[in-house]
Image (cartoon, rainbow, N blue to C red):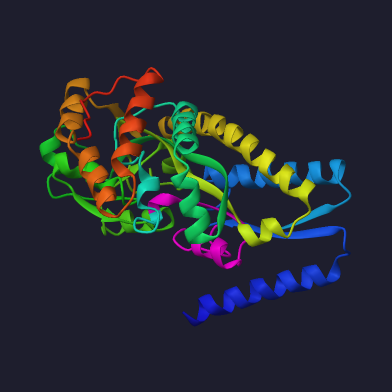
Amino acid sequence: MLTRQLAIAVIALLGLIATGCSDSKTVNLRIGAGHPAGPAVYATQMRDFFVPEVTRRVAAETDYEINFIEGYGGSIAKVAETLEAVQSGILDIGAYCVCFEPSKLFLHNFSYFVPFGPRDSAQAIQVARRIYDTHPWLYEQLSQNYKQELLALNGWDNYHLGTVMPWHSIDELQGVKIAGAGPNLPWLEFAGAVPVQSVLPDGYLSMQTGVYSGWLMFPSAYYSFKFHEPAPNYTLVNFGAVGGAVVLTANKDAMAALPIDVQEIIREVGRDYERVASVALNEGQKLGLKNLEEAGTYIRTLPDSVRKEWAESLAGFPNQMAKDADARDMPGSEIIRDYIEAVSQSGHEWPANYEIE
């Protein structure tokens, strides 16, 4: 706790020093994410697209300059701390997976609550954007409860299952400890595996030392975090890409303090980032699989018949989550029902019949 408080104090001091050393035409903003840029696509695109594009446009189109103080990989806030860091102003802009806020942002995990969705990340994010834009409650909860303005949606590429040991029958997963982000752990129920909530930075050592023996993970991160070394067996289950799982947000007070033209550029680049990052996720999926294959990973595809059986075993899961959200005074049934319909309208065929009562 002391180390965490000291880190916050140092970051705040650095921000004050930077502000004090700059003239009135320089805007200093702290931006960060819990995952590292490089292995994590959303953080990479923050570093490689969002920051330089906002910097470029502000310099070219306004009388101001932007000075970003960047902190990825948990150097300012860890994966489960970023929402609070943006809320408190430790970060002016941050990105994080809503999967690490299972209580505060329960319903924002709606795409996790309906597995076996679109395999294409761009399609998944477009559907999630449609749900956000037709359900203002999602924006308002971030704004009213956590003092944040949503700048962009992002997500993850198609989820599969990596394991330490090879397996060919679902029965072989009975009792095996498998890690995941949290809201996707119920996907393992059919296989009888033991779900373990974890975070990516802990995965390599945990699988190497036997804390757990597998991960629900998409190819881009499975390769980037070198999970294929302790767990060289990768089964293409096609649980689907999860659109809207990652959000890019800004502290409302920090945004309000900015010149109007700078605010508008940040919002516009945020939407551009959403499109750029969704394309990068699809590219990361292909490259991740290619790299895994070249690294000698044993890759196999789950038979369609088993996948369908797996999906049918989870047919009641979306309704269960919808009713859970309703009980929390959230529009769960409405949002999850609309999400299922929007995915169907996008051309995706669900392998199971998901109904919301």
Relative to 291, 271 lies left or right: right
From the viewer's side, name the closer residue of 69 and 285.
69
Q: Give the image location of residue 164, x and y in percent.
A: 27, 46
Q: Which residues are magenta?
A: 71-99
Position of the C terminus by quadrant: top left
The answer to which of 334 and 202 lies nearer the viewer is 334
Q: Give the tally of numbered discs.
A: 0
The quadrant holding residue 20 is bottom right
Q: Is residue 340 left or right of residue 354?
A: right
**Residue drawn at 29 percent across, 27 percent down:** 300
The answer to which quarter of the image holds residue 110 is top left
Residue nearest the observer in this picture, 121 or 177: 121
For this orientation, the residue located farthest to the bottom is: 2
User: Is residue 89 a member of the stretch shown in magenta?
Assistant: yes
Residue lying at the far top in this picture: please name it. Answer: 347
Q: Residue at x 85, y 41 (%)?
A: 61
The answer to whether residue 218 is above or below residue 286 is below
Is any part of residue 70 visible from this angle? no
Q: Is residue 237 above or below residue 215?
A: above
Q: Is residue 285 magenta?
A: no
Task: Identify the residue at image location x=21%, y=25%.
Answer: 352
* Residue occupying image coordinates x 57% and y 79%: 6
Q: Position of residue 62 (x, y in %)?
A: 86, 46
Is 231 rendered above or below residue 274?
below
Q: Can you give x and y, in whole percent of width and height, for residue 206 in the image?
A: 33, 58
Residue 223 showing in the rendered view: yes
* Residue 327 locus on image (x, y percent): 25, 53
